[in-house]
Image (cartoon, grey):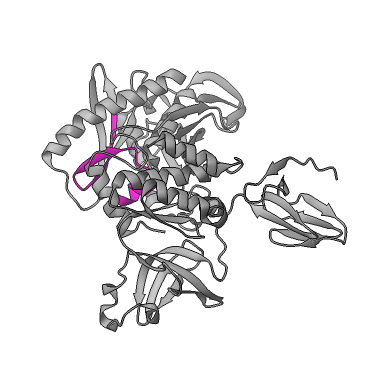
Amino acid sequence: MAVKKISVQGSEEPQKKRYIVVPGEVIVSGEDYLPSDGTRRQGADIVAAKYGLAEEAGMVIRVIPLTGAFVPRRGNQVIGRVSNITMNGWVIDIDWASNAFLPIDESPHFINKNEMDQFLAIGDLMLGKIEGITARGIDLSFDGPGLGKLEGGFSFKVSPNRVPRVIGREGSMINLIKDNTKCDVAVGQNGWCWVYSEDMEGMLKARKAIEMITEKPFVEGLTEKMESWFQENK
Amino acid sequence: MDISKNTFEAMKTLVEQGKRFDGRALTEYRAVEISYDVSKAAEGSARVRMGKTEVIAGVKLTLDKPYPDSPEKGNLLVSGDLLPLASPRYEVGPPKFDAIELPRLVDRVIRESHVIELDKLVVKAGEKVWTVIIDVYPLNDDGNLVDAAVLAAIAALKQAKMPGVTEAGFPDYKHRTKQAVPLAKELVPLSVTLFKLGNALFIDPTREEAEAAEVKCNFGLTKQGKKHMIHSAQKTGAKPFTQKELETAAILIGEKYDELYDKLKKVL
């Protein structure tokens, strides 16, 4: 099968060649390669299972998805909304097929079981880490820097596949946004972002910047572009 | 994920200052785009984009028995559903509140304006009349579905052509006539939905704004000569509108009607 390959340069690692593939498209043929995330083996071929950018890293082939829903992994940081309170913890909506659970032990201080909404009430936002995924559901924890209840500000959603771009290499993009808008910014792997500042204009600017980044998946040197955008829109 | 307390409070402060998350004014529509003939099977069809909101509407005509209480009138039927395609909020299964409300609101706006001359759709009184079926399907829901759906339904109706009739008396969809559906030409019913959050009134919300809104009121109106006429209104939500707010609204919905009508007129 002749495959028309369009090369797209990724910003995170510009040296590597990447190709746009659609589900069912043959990426490479032969037993020398190993299928990784977003691909599957079909006979001798390695076939894309998702729409995205195919990447060859040595003998491992993977597809970085461009669209699609969030798939939770252990260790992911997510922003969720408290949707229910139970006897021994909080039920958190993290925008996935099932709810996540935050045990009462994760509270930073002692709480009376009858007054659990003193810490997290229904409708509150929190930033947590996925501790484990079992058949019963997802367990969250507050074990890490910056994790906990998010107070004030507001939240909005971007595509979960663009989250790495919003964060940037070693957090370069997110730090750029924080410095230029004087905002506190948190980004969850599930695509939910939260911004907080005393100044409403700063928060709106941060949101606009993040939405701009997520709408431009193929732009090279995005950090420099955003730097000049902040210069123009001071 | 439902709207969080944080976002609700932030949005309330913002709209009370007269601003919005996307930088629009409170009474500003997003870019409206209307296109025709999106379906070959329908007698008339249209697609409306309002920002990221996207709705298609199709008009289908069949021959049917009239309802017993109106033997000398054609039938009007509006149906629609909120497909999972449109938003992660919607799931397959029995229609829920929003999915029942949408076609009912569209139905009321069109029916109560009497834009379709149902008495001209009679083939044989009491036995055979045309049924006008309007199907409304949102392709993408980013708020304000009702206004977009009514706009799409009217655009599709204006474009619809009657099907032929076979010798056996069945509709012949392969040979459409050039005759349009009998419409009251001077009437164009449109819907303008008003939302209230805190003490601010706004229109054309995005999905998050619609979720945060405490009250909404849907108006169906037409313009007759130089005057606007409200044919239908439905309020949802527990909080009240003050008299002063409704007085502002009465002027506002007229202005917004004209704005939408101008956009529709350009493509008709």
**Seen in the image, is A145 located left or right of residue B110?**
right
Q: Which residue is located at x 29 percent, y 54 percent?
A: B8
**Seen in the image, is B23 located left or right of residue B12?**
right
Q: Which residue is located at x 55 percent, y 59 percent?
A: A70
Quadrant into which the C terminus of chain B falls: top left
Snapshot quadrant of residue B53: top left
**Residue at the extreme left of the image, as rendered:** B243
| Depth check, front residue: B77 or B44 | B44
Which span of residues is magenta-colored?
B194-221
A220 shown above or below B1: above
Snapshot quadrant of residue B247: top left
Q: Which residue is located at x 42 percent, y 64 percent?
A: A80
Residue A115 horizontal/vertical position (percent): 25, 78
A43 shown above or below B157: below
A100 shown above or below A234: below
Residue A99 horizontal/vertical position (percent): 46, 69
Quadrant into which the N terminus of chain B falls: bottom left
Residue B192 horizontal/vertical position (percent): 31, 34
